[in-house]
Image (cartoon, coloured by chain):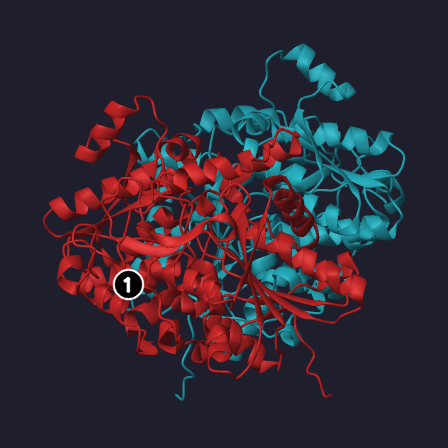
Chain colours: A red, B cyan
Amino acid sequence: MSEKKIPYKIYLEEHEMPKKWYNLRADMKNKPAPLLNPGTLKPMTADELAPVFCKDLILQELDDTTPYFDIPTEIQDFYKMYRPAPLVRAYCLEKHLQTPAKIYYKFEGNNTSGSHKLNSAIAQAYYAKKQGLKGVTTETGAGQWGTALSMACSYFDLDCKVYMVKVSYEQKPFRREVMRTYGASVTPSPSTETNVGRKILEQFPGTSGSLGCAISEAVEVATTSEGYRYVLGSVLNQVLLHQSVIGLETKAALDKYNITPDIIIGCAGGGSNLGGLIAPFMGEKLRGEKDYRFIAVEPASCPSLTRGKYAYDFCDTGMVCPLAKMYTLGSSYIPAPNHAGGLRYHGMSSTLSQLYDDGLMEAVSVTQTDVFKAAEEFARVEGILPAPESSHAIKVAIDEALKCKDNGEEKTIVFGLTGTGYFDMMAYEKFHDGKMENYIPTDDEIAKSLEKLPVIPNI
Amino acid sequence: MSEKKIPYKIYLEEHEMPKKWYNLRADMKNKPAPLLNPGTLKPMTADELAPVFCKDLILQELDDTTPYFDIPTEIQDFYKMYRPAPLVRAYCLEKHLQTPAKIYYKFEGNNTSGSHKLNSAIAQAYYAKKQGLKGVTTETGAGQWGTALSMACSYFDLDCKVYMVKVSYEQKPFRREVMRTYGASVTPSPSTETNVGRKILEQFPGTSGSLGCAISEAVEVATTSEGYRYVLGSVLNQVLLHQSVIGLETKAALDKYNITPDIIIGCAGGGSNLGGLIAPFMGEKLRGEKDYRFIAVEPASCPSLTRGKYAYDFCDTGMVCPLAKMYTLGSSYIPAPNHAGGLRYHGMSSTLSQLYDDGLMEAVSVTQTDVFKAAEEFARVEGILPAPESSHAIKVAIDEALKCKDNGEEKTIVFGLTGTGYFDMMAYEKFHDGKMENYIPTDDEIAKSLEKLPVIPNI
C-alpha cells in the first residue's frame, strides 16, 4: 500500500511518449467488417481506394493484423510540440461531488486546434506529403477537424481545401479565421464549385448544409483534381490507429502510478476519440489480461449506438463513399440542431460498432441540457471550459461518480476530455439564457430513415 | 560540454513548482516611488487603501523590503490545476528562421482564461475570501482579466462584478459568456449603475467606454457596497509579486538544463507579465550575480515607455485612483483602436518604470501589422495561435533571432507567450483581409496629453 502521491497532472517525459501506434483490430477476434464498393458490393481493394486516399493510409486502413505501426520521426517531432497531453486527476471535481471515486481525465484540448483531431491530421498530412501530393481536401462541421488539418498542412506545406457545413461557416466565423491563419481555403458547403454541391443546391435551395454533403463535395474535388486526395477526421480505421496515441499515453501515465481504471468513458460521434482512448485497454480485455467497463456517450439527438441498426450503410449523405458496416441511423438521417457538432454523425466507426455488437462496450445517450449543466459544473471546479462534445463524457463520468457515492465504492474513472469550448460560446449563451432545447427523435423517425439503408446480399 | 538533450517542452514536476513569490522590489536600490493620495499628495497609507483593496494585498502592495512571500497552500493547489506552464524550446521557429539563436518561450495560455492573468486573480480572490468579503469588483477590456477573475471567484465562491468596456462587451460576446459560465455578472461600461457611469454618459452620450472609465465604476461599486473590494489585474506591485511565479518557473526550468538566457523579452501593457517574467533574473542582475538584456515591447500606438514621461499620474481616466509614478502618456491619453486590448494602457507599473529609468531594461515599440505578421508566422510553425498582446514579444524575439543569424551569434532568447488569440479572430480577420491599420501618435498628440499631468511638488 505504498501509494505514490498522485499529482494534479501526470505528464509523461518526452522519452516516454509512444513511438508506435496500436492497431486494436489486430487483437479482435471478430474483425470489423470491410468497406464495400457500393457498385460491386465487394470489399474495397487498395487499388479502388487509391484515387481517394493516400497510399500509406490505405495500407493502414486495410491492415487488421499488424498490432503496431511505427510513428514516423517527423510525426513524433510534431507530437512533441503539443503532446504529451496531461492526464489530470480531478481532485476538485471529486471534492465537489463528495464522491469516493477517483476521477481522471485525459485532456486533449491544449493545442490550437482545440481538440484531439490534430493527432490524426498531422499523420494524414505527413503521408500525403510523403506521396508527393499537392494538397488534400476535407469537410468540417464544428471546425475542429478543419482547424487541425489546416495546422498540419501548414506544417508540411501542403494545400488544404476545407468544405465547411454552411451553417457552421456562418455561425462560426472565428473558426474559419483560425483556418485562414493557417493558410487553408475554406468554402461553405454546399457550394457551386462541385457537381454534387450544385445538384444539392438545386434540390434544396437555401439549405444550410450537412456534414454528409460536405464530405461528398470534398471527395469530388479530391478525385477530380491532380495531386489531391481526400482525408477524413473520424470513423475510419486509420484515424482510430493514429488516435491510439491518446490511449497509449493515458495507459503509460496510469502505469507510472500503478493506477488501474475500472471505467473508461468517452464521447462518441464517429468514434475517433473513444476508439483511440480505449484502444490499449480494450486490447488487454480482448487478450484476457484485464477487464474494464467501457462507456460510449452519444447525444440523445443522434443515438447511433443506442438506437441505430448494425448494418452496411453509406458513410456520407451524398452516397459517394464506400459502404461501411456500422451502427447507423441511416445516411439520410439529419440530426437535429445540436451544439455538439462533432457528434452529429449518423454512423459510427466499424471497429467500435463491432466491439459494441460483441458486448465488449456499453453505450448511453444523454440530452443536451444535461450535458451543458455538467459542462458548467465541470468548468467551475476544474477550471477548463469544455467543448460540448467532450461534455458528454463529463456528464456520464459525473453520473458514475455519484453512483460510487451512493454505493460507497472507490472506483477509478477515466474519461476523455477531447477539447475546449472557446468557439462554442453561442451554445453556452443559449444554455445560460434558458433557450436551449432538447431533441429526441421518435422511433418512427429513426425507422423511416433506416428504411433507406442499402440492401446488401449476404457476402 | 555534456549537454542534456533539451526537450520541446520543459515541465517542472509538481514538487519543483515555486512555493514562494519573489518580491523584486526588495533587491532594488532605487525603490519604485510610492502611490500618492491625490488629495494630500502624501504616500498612501494602509488605512487609506483599506476601503478599496483587501488587507493582505495592501501589505504586499506596500512592502518593498521582504524578498519572498509564501504562496498559501490553497493557491498552490489551484496553481497545480493549470500550472506548471511549459517552457517551450521553439525548435520549429529556429529552423524556420534558420537562426543559430536558441529560442524559448514560457507559454501561459494553457488555461481557460487564456492568459497569465489567472496567476494573480486566484491570489486576489483568495485574500478576499480570507478577509470574509462577499465579493470583488473589477474592470476588463479585452476580457482576459475578467475571465481569470471569474474563474478564481467561482473557485472560492465569491461574487464577481465585472465592468467591461462597452465596445468589448459588444464585440466580444463570447468572452462575456465565458465569464457568465463562471457565474460572474458582466456590465457594459459606462453603465447607469454608478454615479461616475451616469456622469460620463451625460457628458459623452453614446460613448463606447474605456478602461479608465470602467476602473472608475468598479472602484465606486467596491467602495460603496458592503463586503466588496476592488481588484486590479496589472500595474500594481502586488500583481507583479504574484506574477513572479512565471519567472520563477522559467528560471527553474532553465536551471534544470543549465541554460542561461542572454535576452529576455516580454510584452508590456501595465507590466504584469513582463514584471513577473523577468523578476528573478532581474534580481540576479541587481545583486550583481549575472547580467541579462531585458526588452519590454509595447505597441507603437501606446508607447508609454518609449515615448512617455516618467512622472506621477492617475492610474485611471476617471482620476479616482491614487497617483503612481510611472512612464505615462497622460491619463487622458486615449489609445487608438489597437487589437491588443491588454496593452492599451496609458501608464506602466511603477517597478518597471523605475528599472527602465535606471537603465536596467530596454524598451521598443512595434506596429500592429508587423505584430500580426509575426503572430501568423509563429502560429504556422509553432502551432500555437498567439494573442495579439503576446505577439508583440514574438515580433521582437524574431527580430533578435534574425540579428543573431546576421552576426552568427548563438544567443539564447527567452520570451513570454502570455496567452492565446481564440477570442481575437476579428483582429486576425482584419489582418487577413488587409484591412488592419497602423496608428502612431504624433509628438504633438503625446505632448498635449502630457500637459494635463497632475502637478506634484517635490516631496
Q: Is residue B412 visible?
A: no
Quadrant for residue B263, please give it. Answer: bottom left
Q: Nearer the viewer, residue B17 or A204?
A: A204
Q: Amino acid at mark 1?
A: Pro
Write down the chain letter for disc 1: A
Q: Nearer the viewer, residue A139 or B416?
A: A139
Q: Is residue A102 visible?
A: yes
Q: Position of residue A232 (x, y in %)?
A: 31, 53
Relative horizontal placement of residue A142, taking residue A96 as reference (left or right)? left
Residue under the point 33% across and 41% down: A212
Q: Position of residue A389 (x, y in %)?
A: 52, 49
Q: Secondary structure at mark 1?
A: loop
Residue under the point 82% across and 48% down: B128
Relative to B247, say whether B226 is above or below: above
Residue at which label 1 appears: A34
Residue under the point 23% across and 32% down: A197
Quadrant for residue B145, please give it. Answer: top right
Residue under the point 46% across and 80% down: A16
Quadrant for residue A371, please give it. Answer: top right
